Image (cartoon, rainbow, N blue to C red):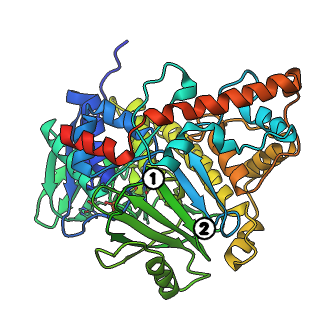
């Protein structure tokens, strides 16, 4: 039955043109087409946050939906391939482990591969968990080419590192070619309906007035519409994720580019090193309660291994989430909706999933309390699940050399995370919560990498004789390494793609 059109949502206005603004504009226009007219307002004077270079594999789906040619994308955004994050000094100084996008071993019925590997250790099979992971081997060897594997054991999942400002520029070109209208100017005031408080129009300092039915707030940390106008409120999570500052600086590229991000723990935080085609991205995320800005800057500059290319930039933040990410006729996307520090490169993904959610719940016949509530419920769960995964990296550690890591070890954990850790410790069990972005293989690598070894393994493993178990582990070890000799170096692959663009 056709609903009578009460308050149809046709005019979508996006405030802000960073990664969030242009990703929202391009995806919504591509999917919703003529059902919406999209206008985007941005101010070149204000600019963007200018960081955000590492991604996770679902970004490839976005590019596919947008019809982006991969060679063209790699060329335009100076992108490199990301197979993993290497965490250094997190468990103890000098130790490192990988969180790869792959999975160790292979899918087994009823219980995961790592249970078999745990028993294998008792039987004298000394290979590490990551020896059974092709992503790890390719990352270490600096090799890459997409593998179109019929057998999931041989998959090589990947994401990208890219220059975020070039990505936004690319998305802008795409959006405008689909009919998105861009307006330059600073939003100086916001008009609201006297009765329901909905936003009616944005007024710009150049006297332009932009009316809309639905407003997407992509104005960055300040949340011009969701917070400064509607006063929605913020759940502050800095008691769980206390880092509150970052200093970012680009530096010269290395001679060869590694296909992984480095995350190096320091005294009160950590440093990222992200390889791009034309430069490295570097930054130091730290907690200002434990180290001064000067100390943090010295640590960063002292740990650059190539020449800096610009002045360092300080960024302050508060981890947490907007209490309602959809409020009245405003949906916040990107930094305006909340911030989880970039340890697992999840922010651009959160933009992507917010847009998908909004499209799935698009209020074409008008905004209703149920649509808004469902959107907010799903967003809250997503933020909480990622928050727990990030806390895990900090709270499970053996770093006795740092007051910060000592305190993080004694953190009062959310019940959800406490339960997950206890279960894994007991017998290695891991279950993916509903819609959790991170699969069991991610939780496994970080739990084990940070220093939790389960006390037991699943009893099902004992249905394999010792000989059969050893034979399976030996065979898998060989299978996981075999494709490596066929892969070109990461740089050879990139050069080939860029030439094709
Ligand atoms: P911004 O980039 O701040 O854009 C805001 C936009 O709003 C701009 O266009 C601005 O001009 C406009 N605007 C603001 N006020 C007005 C006004 N009054 N009038 C008109 N226009 C206005 N994410 C990842 O996925 N991976 C990473 O590796 C990663 N690293 C990060 C490291 C740090 C230190 C930080 C802080 C963030 C990182 N992020 C990362 C997050 C990522 O940077 C952001 O999610 C992404 O850039 C989106 O930002 P945004 O578009 O929401 O905001």
Q: Residue at x 29, y 29 (%)?
A: 31
The quarter of the picture where residue 219 lies is bottom left
Q: Nearer the viewer, residue 61 or 350?
A: 61
Residue at the image position 59 percent from the left and 51 percent from the top = 98
Tell me where residue 402 appears, x and y as whole percent.
69, 78
Considering only order in the chain, which callout, 1 or 2, is on the residue closer to the N terminus? 2
Numbered label attached to residue 37: none
Q: Residue at x 13, y 38 (%)?
A: 177
Label 1 CB, ligand 1: below 8 Å?
Answer: yes
Q: Nearer the viewer, residue 8 or 348?
A: 348
Q: 473 above or below 332?
A: above
Residue at mark 1: 347
Residue 307, compared with residue 340, is above or below; it is below
Q: Look at mark 2 in the image and give the residue it sits on.
A: 238
How packed mark 1 is, by other alpha carbons closer than 10 Å (few <14, some 14-19, many 20 or more), is many
Task: Report crowding for label 2: few under 14, some 14 to 19, many 20 or more residues within 10 A (C-alpha).
Answer: some
Q: Mark 2 and mark 1: span between their CA atoms?
A: 17 Å
Q: Is residue 217 left or right of residue 34?
A: right
Residue 12 point in image, percent of width and height: 26, 42
* Ligand 1 image position (quadrant): bottom left
Quadrant location of the N terminus in the rendered image: top left
Q: Is the CB atom of the residue marked by disc 2 within 8 angstroms of ligand 1's nearest atom?
A: no
Expressed as whole percent of the image width and height from the top left, the position of residue 309 reads 29, 74
The answer to whether residue 110 is left or right of residue 230 is: right
280 shown above or below 3:
below
Q: Residue furthest top?
A: 1
Is residue 228 visible to the viewer in this orientation of the structure? no
- Of tags 2 and 1, which is closer to the observer? 1
Callout 2–callout 1 Cβ contact below 8 Å: no
SS for callout 1: helix
């Amino acid at each position: 039955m056709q609903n009578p059109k009460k308050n149809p949502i046709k005019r979508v206005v996006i405030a802000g043109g960073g990664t969030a603004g242009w990703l929202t504009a391009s995806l919504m226009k591509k999917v919703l087409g003529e059902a919406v007219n999209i206008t985007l307002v941005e101010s070149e004077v204000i600019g963007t946050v200018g960081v955000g270079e590492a991604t996770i594999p679902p970004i490839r789906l976005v590019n596919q939906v947008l019809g982006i040619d991969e060679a063209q994308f790699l060329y335009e955004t100076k992108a490199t391939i990301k197979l993993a994050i290497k965490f250094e000094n997190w468990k103890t100084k000098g130790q490192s482990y990988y969180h790869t996008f792959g999975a160790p071993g292979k899918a087994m019925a009823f219980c995961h591969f790592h249970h078999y590997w745990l028993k294998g250790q008792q039987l004298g099979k000394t290979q590490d968990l990551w020896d059974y992971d092709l992503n790890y081997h390719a990352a270490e060897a600096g090799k890459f080419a997409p593998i179109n594997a019929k057998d999931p054991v041989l998959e090589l999942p990947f994401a990208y590192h890219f220059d975020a400002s070039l990505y936004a520029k690319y998305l802008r070109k795409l959006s405008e070619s689909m009919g998105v209208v861009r307006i330059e100017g600073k939003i100086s005031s916001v008009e609201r309906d006297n009765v329901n408080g909905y936003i009616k129009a944005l007024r710009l300092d150049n006297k332009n007035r932009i009316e809309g039915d639905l407003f997407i707030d992509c104005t960055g940390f300040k949340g011009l519409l969701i917070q400064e106008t509607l006063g929605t409120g913020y759940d502050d999570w800095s008691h769980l994720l206390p880092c509150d500052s970052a200093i970012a600086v680009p530096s010269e590229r290395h001679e060869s580019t590694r296909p992984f991000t480095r995350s190096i723990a320091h005294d009160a935080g950590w440093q990222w090193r992200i390889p791009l085609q034309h430069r490295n991205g570097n930054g130091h995320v730290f907690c200002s309660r434990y180290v001064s800005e000067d100390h943090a800057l010295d640590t960063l500059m002292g740990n650059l291994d190539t020449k800096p290319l610009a002045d360092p930039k300080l960024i302050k933040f508060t981890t947490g989430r907007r209490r309602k990410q959809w409020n009245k006729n405003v949906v916040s996307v990107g930094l305006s909706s909340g911030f989880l520090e970039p340890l697992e490169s999840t922010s651009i993904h959160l933009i992507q999933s917010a847009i998908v959610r909004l499209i799935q719940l698009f209020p074409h016949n008008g905004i209703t309390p149920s649509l808004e509530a469902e959107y907010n419920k799903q967003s809250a769960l997503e933020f909480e699940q990622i928050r727990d995964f990030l806390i895990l990296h900090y709270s499970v550690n053996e770093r006795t050399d740092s007051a910060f890591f000592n305190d993080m070890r004694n953190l009062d954990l959310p019940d959800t995370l406490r339960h997950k850790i206890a279960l894994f410790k007991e017998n290695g069990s891991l279950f993916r919560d509903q819609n959790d972005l991170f699969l069991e293989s991610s939780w496994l690598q970080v739990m084990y990498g940070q220093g939790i070894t389960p006390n037991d393994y699943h009893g099902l493993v004992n249905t394999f004789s010792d000989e059969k178990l050893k034979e399976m582990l030996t065979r898998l070890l060989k299978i996981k390494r075999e494709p490596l000799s066929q892969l070109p170096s990461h740089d050879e692959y990139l050069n080939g793609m860029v030439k094709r663009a």
